């Protein structure tokens, strides 16, 4: 059975000191989640546990994001996390530190209901 995207939320997050890519990613996901409400899903009588949640995180160093920690931070649904090159690193030449900026896109999908295709 196919799925249909019913929600797309975007967010950004950062870690200003220490270059923690996972912390920036988690903040980006939380930012996206705080822009969203599941009222559509509740009003349609859909089970939030059946949601397919696709999270895409963009950071300059994707290999430094703990995708499992990001997945575990999601409150509902069956999540898949993909980390790609994106975001922004802002170096501080004086201290040698970097500020990490992450972006997040969260898509919620449901299996297509009969008759809604």
Image (cartoon, rainbow, N blue to C red):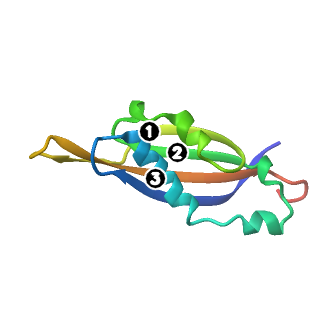
Report how many numbered discs are placed on residues in the image. 3
Q: Residues within 10 Å of mark 3 (few under 14, many from 20)?
A: many
**Mark earlier in primary sequence (1, 2):** 2
- Residue 52 position in % (x across, y down): 71, 46
Q: Which residue is mark 3?
A: 27
The residue depicted at 46 percent of the width and 53 percent of the height is: 28
The residue depicted at 57 percent of the width and 46 percent of the height is: 55
Q: Is residue 73 left or right of residue 24?
A: right
Q: Residues within 10 Å of mark 2 (few under 14, many from 20)?
A: some
Quadrant location of the C terminus in the rendered image: bottom right
Rendered view: 5 above or below 44: above
Confirm or deny contact between disc 1 and disc 3 (CB under 8 A). Answer: no
Q: Nearer the viewer, residue 87 or 96?
A: 96
Confirm or deny contact between disc 3 and disc 2 (CB under 8 A). Answer: no
The residue depicted at 23 percent of the width and 44 percent of the height is: 98
Q: Which residue is mark 1?
A: 84
The residue depicted at 36 percent of the width and 52 percent of the height is: 14
Indicate the quadrant where residue 33 lies.
Answer: bottom right
Viewer-side label of 1, 3: 3
Q: CA distance from mark 1 to mark 2?
A: 7 Å
Q: Nearer the viewer, residue 45 or 6?
A: 45
Q: CA distance from mark 1 to mark 3?
A: 16 Å
Q: Which residue is mark 2?
A: 56
Residue extending furthest toward the right: 114
Residue extending furthest toward the left: 94
Confirm or deny contact between disc 1 and disc 2 (CB under 8 A). Answer: yes
């Amino acid at each position: 059975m196919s799925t249909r995207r019913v929600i797309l939320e975007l967010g950004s997050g950062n870690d200003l000191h220490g270059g923690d890519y996972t912390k920036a990613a988690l903040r980006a996901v939380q930012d996206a989640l705080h822009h969203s409400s599941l009222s559509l899903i509740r009003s349609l009588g859909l089970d939030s546990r059946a949601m397919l949640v696709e999270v895409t995180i963009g950071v300059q160093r994707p290999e430094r994001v703990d995708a499992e920690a990001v997945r575990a931070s999601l409150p509902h649904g069956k999540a898949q996390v993909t980390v790609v090159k994106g975001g922004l690193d802002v170096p501080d030449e004086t201290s040698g530190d970097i500020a990490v900026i992450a972006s997040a896109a969260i898509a919620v999908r449901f299996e297509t209901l009969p008759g809604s295709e």
